[in-house]
Image: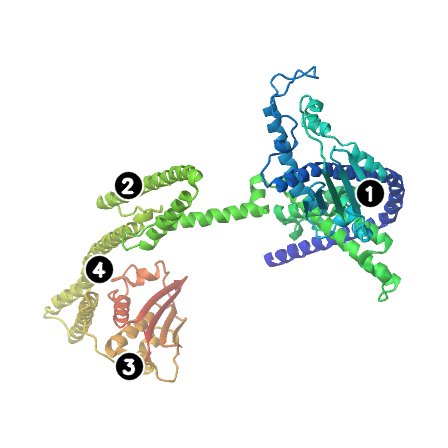
Amino acid sequence: MLDTKLKNNSGRRGAGLFISIVILSLLASAVLLFYKPIVENAKGFIETSKSTREKDLENLKESEEDTFLENLFKSNYVLKWELERQIDNKKYSASDIFSNNTGVFDITENTENADPNDSYEAFKDDFNEMMDSWNYEFFYTTLPSYQLEYYVVDNKTGNYLTNTGAKFSALLNDKEDAKNIKDGYYFCTMMQFDKDGNLSIPYFQGLSNEKKNAYLSFNLTQQMVDRNWNNAAWYASRVKRLAGMTVVYGVKSASLLQSDYLSQEDYMSYWVINEAYNRGGAVYLYAGSFLLVMLLGFLLPAIKPLGIGKGIEAKVPVEIWGLGMAFTFAIYEEGILTLIKETVTGDVFLLSGNHIFNEGIASAVVNVFNILVWLFIFFVWFAAALSIRELFIKKPVRYLKENTLTFRFLGWVGRVTKRGYHYVTSFDMSKKDNKKLILLLGGNLFLMILFCSMWGVGIFGAIIYTGVLFYFINKYKKKVTADYKAITEAAVRISEGNLEGTIDEDLGIFNPLKEQLMKVQQGFRKAVLEETKSQKMKTELITNVSHDLKTPLTAIITYVDLLKDKNLTEEQIDSYIETLDRKALRLKILIEDLFEMSKAASNTIAMNPVEVDLTALIKQLHFELSDRIEKADIDFRARIPEEKVVAWLDSDKTYRIFENLLINMCKYTLPNSRAYLDMELKEKEVFVTVRNISQAELDFSGEEIVERFVRGDKARNSEGSGLGLAIAKSFTELQGGTFQVITDGDLFKVVVGFKIL
């Protein structure tokens, strides 16, 4: 019935998972009906946003070109500085090149708001700092970003600087190949500064004339204003104008000047389309689907016959469905919106334009793909809802333990750490344990080397490590002290005679001592039990033997007294003599059994092992006792194999074993019942089993019946010494065999086993 119930539960869980997939698949199919309305709505929003987007992009393009021209303005100063240092071969500072003054500024001249703390030295330091930043910006930002090529020449000396192999010098002399050079560049300009610092721009290729005019509006005063200099115009007038040089700049690709514009154009186009699809209903479809699936995840398990929420879908760990949820939200912009657009336009897998599938098959493949995508998303959400529902059913602690991988991992780490701690701290004091000692010292050495390599941080780490080490050593010391106290208390209890107490707790390094102490306690307990048993047996010996010996002895004395009567007839005399003979024989058997049992118990009996055929021995015994078995009114069944079963045994003692068993059977078997003797071979052993139904109630165990002087009837009315089974067991065990007595209700069974040759 339990098996049927388990099968039903398993089938219900499988049915619940199947029903969940069917419901989610139907919902995923319904989502496809909203694709076309979303795309149609998005088209209108895209047209509305187009003009605004183009205006924003144009402004961005204008701003990027202005930034480029401002960088060229700064570059002219940097190149002039570099050119002057090359001409004189000196490391001039920027102020050495561009300053008009060599003394202290007269800050009261031509200024109303001069700062009396300003001085020439302060100005020079700040100006040098500005030019250093321009120099860095030119070589590490402007040149690589625009792949800017330049050629600057001193008009007086003819010294020049360039970073290109192009013959920009040809542009200065207007040679025939100047046009070819210009044609190789998107942007190309020449700026000429005469000896008085007047600027002329002979040509300005790639940008509009408005940009040329915008460049001419750049001035040093504005740069100083941007740096928050006081009296910027006044300080700018103390800086020499650029003069006596010509600079040519070239940029080969428009994309280098408009990189932000081009990237923003793609981004804004992408953003506008996504925004249009969201406004067209995609975001509402996604959010509505999410809420609906979550609601189903909470409500469907309440319908018990569906069996939803009992299978694997409700057992997804929190971390997995959490990552799944994050993934489903992350792919919305890049994945879902693109999927909606390309499904409607027929661009998914490019199936609409191939020649492998016709239009119907291509559409079916795309629809199946969409359903699978949405089914995956819905299943993640559904599993999350089922898992969150479990949080309300279970307690938070149980939920975290059963539904999170983190807690399982932490539990595993805790168990491993505990086992590791137990391993390294459980030293066996009875043997060398250098492996653990080396492991501990090696780990400590590694940490010390690590701390030493970390300098200041390492010192801090060493302090923390020392504190942690002190805590664990102190904790271990307390445990060792407690374990030592427990082991000494146990030793005191044993010394006081309390042999029943146990030590269940783990004593760490004292575990070997605990085990030895428990063995000593068990030895003492066994010795005490043996002594108690011996005293009990002595008492039983006195009681039982005196009773068993007294009965025939009393009868002998009585009949001897009767024989003294002179008036007895011949028949009476013969009857009394027969009784005396029987009682004397009974007394002889009792004494012989007693001596035989004593020898067996003291292990002083002599054994003469030979090859004994157990089959023949038991058949002979059966034949000799057949009359007695018949008188006992027992239907005896002996099942003995025909082949020889040879064992290395003492034939007399073995004969006595089975004789005692069969005689015992005859005495105590219920009349008119069946008794059995079976011989069975198992590998290299033979087992002889004797079974019978007892005529008296078996109110003792198998162990009790083989004790000495115990009989099947506790009233001791039957003949016998009560030593038959005890002698049989002793003889069996002395020959390396096994002797087992089993009682089951009124069934009495003895199993004797020997090894065979």
Q: Percent from the top left, x then y, of residue 267?
A: 78, 44
Secondary element under disc 2, as helix, strand or loop, is helix
Report, in whole angstroms, how far the alpha carbon at label 4 lies from the one at label 1. Answer: 141 Å
Question: Residue lying farthest bottom?
Answer: 643
Give the residue at x 61% y 28%.
124
- List the residue tagged with mark 1: 203
- List the residue tagged with mark 4: 544
Give the residue at x 35% y 65%.
741
Q: Going from the N terminus, do you reach mark 1 or mark 3 first?
A: 1
- List the residue tagged with mark 3: 612
Secondary element under disc 4, as helix, strand or loop, is helix
Report, in whole angstroms, how far the alpha carbon at label 4 lies from the one at label 2. Answer: 50 Å
Q: Is residue 638 left or right of residue 215?
A: left
Is residue 516 depicted above or below 606 in this figure? above
**Res 392 seen here:** no
* The quadrant where residue 45 appears: top right
